[in-house]
Image (cartoon, rainbow, N blue to C red):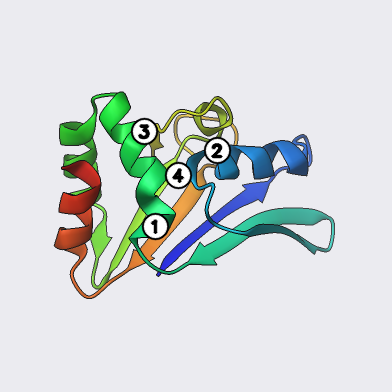
């Protein structure tokens, strides 16, 4: 299971955040959820198909080795959680980030649950 979400700050356009996540994960259906006055873009999918474009972007940017290292260090118990830079995603690039460290905007959070997370990481970075 792949779950992707991104908080939308009041200074951001929800449609642009939606475009950013769709640039990286085009096969996932996303929706904008409003809670009080804040918004969040959310989507989920099953299977590797949801990660195909991310895999392609990692290969094109030639950052598979770095991605493998980041992803392996992002396993928590039975869940893989990593973050992507929202501005880079809007430009169609996959760039890993830490939550709320490198950018004034909140990152895109990706959560992957699978029986064998090492297999998922190897597939993404092969």
Residue 23 numbered tag:
2
- Image position, residue 19 (x, y; %): 65, 39
Quarter of the figure with residue 99: top left
Question: Which secondary structure, mark 1?
Answer: helix
Earlier residue among tags 2 and 1 = 2
Is the N terminus in the top left, top right, bottom left or bottom right quadrant?
Answer: bottom left
Earlier residue among tags 4 and 1 = 1
> Which residue is nearer to you in this view: 93 or 110?
93
Name the residue located 75 percent from the left edge and 41 percent from the top edge. Answer: 15
Q: Mark 2 vs mark 4: give the one in front.
A: 2
Q: Image check: 97 left or right of 79? A: right
Q: Residues within 10 Å of mark 4 (few under 14, many from 20)?
A: some
> Which residue is nearer to you in this view: 49 or 38?
49
Q: Mark 2 vs mark 1: give the one in front.
A: 1
Residue 57 numbered tag:
3
Name the residue located 34 percent from the left edge and 37 percent from the top edge. Answer: 56
Q: Are marks 2 and 4 in contact (CB under 8 Å)?
A: no
Question: Which secondary structure, mark 4?
Answer: loop
Q: CA distance from mark 2 to mark 1?
A: 14 Å
Residue that carries the numbered disc 1 in the rendered image: 49
Q: CA distance from mark 1 to mark 3?
A: 14 Å
Q: Are marks 1 and 3 in contact (CB under 8 Å)?
A: no
Earlier residue among tags 3 and 2 = 2
Name the residue located 41 percent from the left edge and 33 percent from the top edge. Answer: 94
Question: Which secondary structure, mark 2?
Answer: helix
Residue that carries the numbered disc 4 in the rendered image: 99
Q: Mark 1 vs mark 3: give the one in front.
A: 1
Name the residue located 21 percent from the left edge and 64 percent from the top edge. Answer: 117
């Amino acid at each position: 299971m792949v779950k992707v979400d991104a908080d939308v700050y009041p200074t951001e356009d929800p449609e642009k955040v939606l475009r950013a996540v769709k640039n990286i994960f085009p096969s996932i259906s996303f929706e904008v959820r409003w809670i009080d006055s804040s918004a969040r873009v959310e989507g989920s999918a099953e299977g590797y198909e949801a990660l195909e474009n991310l895999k392609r972007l990692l290969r094109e940017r030639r950052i598979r080795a770095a991605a493998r290292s980041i992803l392996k260090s992002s396993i928590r118990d039975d869940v893989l959680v990593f973050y992507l830079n929202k501005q880079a995603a809007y430009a169609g690039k996959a760039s890993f980030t830490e939550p709320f460290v490198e950018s004034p905007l909140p990152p895109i959070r990706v959560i992957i649950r699978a029986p064998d997370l090492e297999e998922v990481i190897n597939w993404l970075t092969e």
